[in-house]
Amino acid sequence: MGVSTSSPEKGISVTTVDVPPVNALAVDDWFALADAVRGAGRDPETRCVVLTAGGRGFNAGVDIKEIQARGRSALVGANRGCFEAFAAVYECEVPVVAAVHGFCLGGGIGLVGNADVIVASEDAVFGLPELDRGALGAATHLARLVPQHLMRALYYTSRTVTAAELHAHGSVWRVVPREGLRAAALELAREIAAKDGELLRLAKAAINGIDPVDVRRSYRFEQGFTYEADASGVADRVRDTFGEDRDGGRRG
């Protein structure tokens, strides 16, 4: 349980997150994930990292209950942990393939939005329920998955989109049955890992260097409004309703 790393094939490193019951990550989990991805990328034998998860879904975001229990110290820790984990995926020295099943929410969007390629199962759904949880952030990463106006609609409504819808927008590489997700992710990772390792690292640095958005600065700017919401009391007011039934859900 927690965050683990394995090497099923030469050149491929798999980082797996398994934090029951729903992969809602506590502060320490986010930092552990960042360390695992950075460590995998630094290994000279690694040519591709696959980011995957166990359990019911890929990621349910931040552990809201931890924030409710510990208050502002947990909020600051979660924000810093998310910042490091998202940056670790983006700055990983080799390509990162995200293998997504079930729900990918909140911080999960930050992870897959910063990945190089996304492979998803047919049951995968993606969304930012931040406004329902007294937080703001990861619009930076959702904007890497869908067009600008759709991103805004999804953000304001907390609705989700399916893997098939993201595939239609070109942000998901392939959609497969859930039982075939790992094999599909490894198949792509194997094709990437067949390239020259040194050249792959140069390619990753080059592609990041021409990115039109500085994702670190953009996300940090968003986080400032999360702190403002917390300081003003708005965040607590919304978080106190966390878990209540709401309208919304899938788009369409």
Image: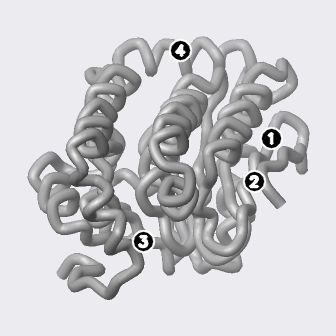
| Quarter of the figure with residue 55 | bottom right
The span from disc 4 to disc 2 (Cα, nearest Å) is 24 Å
Q: Amino acid at mark 4?
A: Ala
Residue at the image point whose x is 60% and y is 12% from the top: 202
Q: Is residue 231 left or right of residue 118?
A: left
Q: Of the numbered discs in the image, which one, if any, rests on residue 13?
A: 1
Determine the image quadrant of residue 10.
top right
The dot on residue 205 is 4
Q: Dot 3, how many residues are within 10 Å of its Cα: few (below 14), some (14-19), or many (20+)? A: many
**Label 1: how many Cα within 10 Å (few below 14, some 14–19, many 20+):** many
Apparent side of residue 15 relative to residue 118 in the rendered image (left or right): right
Tag 4 near tag 2, CB within 8 Å: no
Q: Residue at x 21, y 43 (%)?
A: 232
Q: Nearer the viewer, residue 178 or 159?
A: 159
Whichever of labels 2 and 3 marks the residue nearer the N terminus, that label is 2
Residue placed under numbered mark 3 in the picture:
125
Look at 59% across and 71% down and name the residue there: 57
Marks 1 and 3: in contact by CB < 8 Å? no
Q: CA distance from mark 1 to mark 4?
A: 19 Å
In front of the other: label 3 or label 4? 3
The first of marks 3 and 4 along the sequence is 3
Query: Eyeballing the image, is 186 above or below 36?
Result: below
